[in-house]
Amino acid sequence: MKNKVQVDLIILSYAQTDELKKVTVDCVESLMRSENPEEIKFNVIVIESEKSIKPFQYEQTKTIYPNDEFGYHNFMNIGIEMTASPYICICNNDLIFHPGWATEILKTFDKFIDLSSASPFCTLHHPKMGFKKNDGPKLGYRIRNEVAGWCLFFKRDLLRLTGQLDRNYKFWCADNDYSNTLWVLKLNHMLVTSSFVDHLENKTLNSQTPERQEELTEGESIYFDKKWKCRTGQGWVLL
């Protein structure tokens, strides 16, 4: 990577409490420390759902407060439409970025020219799934395995084939839909086991009421089933 690479990073946040606000602050701080800015420039959009803190701006980001009703893909699309770099990374806010994480992913894109999408390795989660650190890139489409829905790094050109992210997903099944779309279109995705980004697991979701959690999770499966089972049958491996 001789020239500076620009990566557009979209992070969703819901700072209902000081604790949840700190989750986003810690995420952004770890991100901005993770790479040499002379080599990789992160253009960070934080999409904040808690409007009571407006016009607060997370440091080194452009923080926006959409009037739209929350939807994971809807908000990600808003961020994507505001940016123009050749690489996009869509992220939860409950992440800690390790030094060199993006460099390792970009090296993998350089090595595999037909690679469209990648996820980093979570040192808290992936060892439980049987993956090892620094064990080479792993091609695959399994959710919470090769596809880490909390951090998806892809070439902007991918969207020319897939179109926008499906706005019907408010939260759950968004990563399943993303994975299925790549698989159907034969677009390669890899888990990069030398790129480390830790996922602190559902800090925001777990703070919601049981009713809201139900709305954001189980209710999404109905639409997902309607969209995919008619095309793939009950044996669809990515469910």
Image (spheres, grey):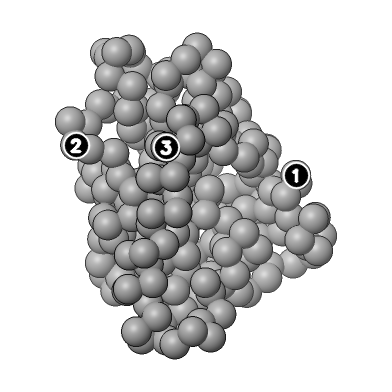
SS at badge 3 = helix
- Give the image location of residue 234, x and y in percent: 49, 84
The label on residue 211 is 3
SS at badge 2 = loop
Q: Do the residues labelled 2 and 3 touch (CB within 8 Å)?
A: no
Which residue is under mark 2? Answer: 68
Residue visible at 75% across and 46% down in the picture: 123
On the rendered structure, is 217 left or right of 193?
Answer: left
Compared with 144, 171 (above or below) is above
| Residue 120 in sight here | yes
> Between marks 2 and 1, how big is the CA–CA gap?
34 Å
Q: Which amino acid does label 3 sit on?
A: Glu
Give the total of numbered labels.
Answer: 3
SS at badge 1 = loop
Residue visible at 65% across and 63% down in the picture: 145
Compared with 93, 155 (above or below) is below
Residue visible at 33% across and 22% down in the picture: 50
- Pick whichever of labels 2 and 3 is earlier in the sequence: 2
- Pick whichever of labels 3 and 1 is earlier in the sequence: 1
Viewer-nearest of labels 3 and 1? 3
Q: Quadrant of the N terminus?
A: bottom right
On the rendered structure, is 32 left or right of 184?
Answer: right
Viewer-nearest of labels 2 and 1? 2
On the rendered structure, is 72 left or right of 98?
Answer: left
> Between marks 2 and 3, how big is the CA–CA gap?
21 Å
Q: Residues within 10 Å of mark 3 (few under 14, many from 20)?
A: few
Which residue is under mark 1? Answer: 124
| Residue 84 in sight here | no
Q: Choose top left, top right, bottom left or bottom right for residue 100.
A: top right
Q: What residue type is labelled 2?
A: Asp
Residue found at the far left of this picture: 67
